[in-house]
Amino acid sequence: MPAMLEPWLAFFHLSAILAWVVFASAQAALCRVEWLNAAVVRRLARLDTILWVATAALLLSGLARIYLGAKGAPWYWGQWLLHLKLTLFLATVALQVGVTRRLRRWDARLRAHGGLPDETEIRAARRGLMLATHLVALIPLAAVFLARGW
């Protein structure tokens, strides 16, 4: 393995993590009953697209670290903490799918006849966003223990 590959893999993975956190947090901050208007619905839809790109980058960079990294795939796949990280990641993605479906409905409704979601829908979407952003905060805990071979 080239000497500089491991730091680059770590850099890309950390960058993807930061991108995910930034765009998920931006969505959570904007998705409020008192702030939601047509411009915010459109912005939430754009942020959601970017968030999915960050999610893909996060998954791909993580897989690259497993398969191309210094420790090797057998070591990683044998670690229960990797499985915990992946489980938390997949739970976050599942929450993200639900929010995405909601945001796409809102955007379609807005484009079709200018309608905005009601308070119940907004609160449900925000709850999903908040749960996802709080859940993802547990992943680095597993990551630091995994990185130290615990």
Image: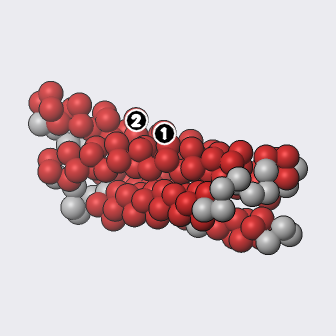
In x, y percent, where is residue 133? 50, 61
On screen, residue 49 versus residue 35, left or right, reads: right
Q: Mark 2 points at which residue?
A: 101
Residue at the image point whose x is 79% and y is 57% from the top: 71
In x, y percent, where is residue 123? 38, 54
On screen, residue 70 versus residue 2, left or right, reads: right
Residue at the image point whose x is 39% and y is 63% from the top: 22
Crowding near pointer 1: few (<14 within 10 Å), some, many (20+)?
A: some
In the rendered view, how is the structure colored? secondary structure
Kind of residue sitting beneath label 2: Arg
| Proximity of marks 2 and 1: CB atoms separated by less than 8 Å | yes
Which of 61/1 is in front?
1
In x, y percent, where is residue 120? 36, 48
User: The C terminus appears in which quarter of the rendering?
Assistant: bottom right
Q: Mark 1 points at which residue?
A: 97
Crowding near pointer 2: few (<14 within 10 Å), some, many (20+)?
A: few
Which of 56/25 is in front?
56
Which of 117/60 is in front?
60
Q: Tell me where residue 93 sits by quadrant.
A: top right
Residue at the image point whose x is 57% and y is 50% from the top: 61
Residue 124 visible in the shown view: no
Kind of residue sitting beneath label 1: Val
Does residue 37 lie above or below 102 as drawn?
below
At numbered mark 2, what does the secondary structure look like: helix, strand or loop? Answer: helix
In x, y percent, where is residue 113? 12, 30
Q: Tell me where residue 42 sits by quadrant.
A: top left
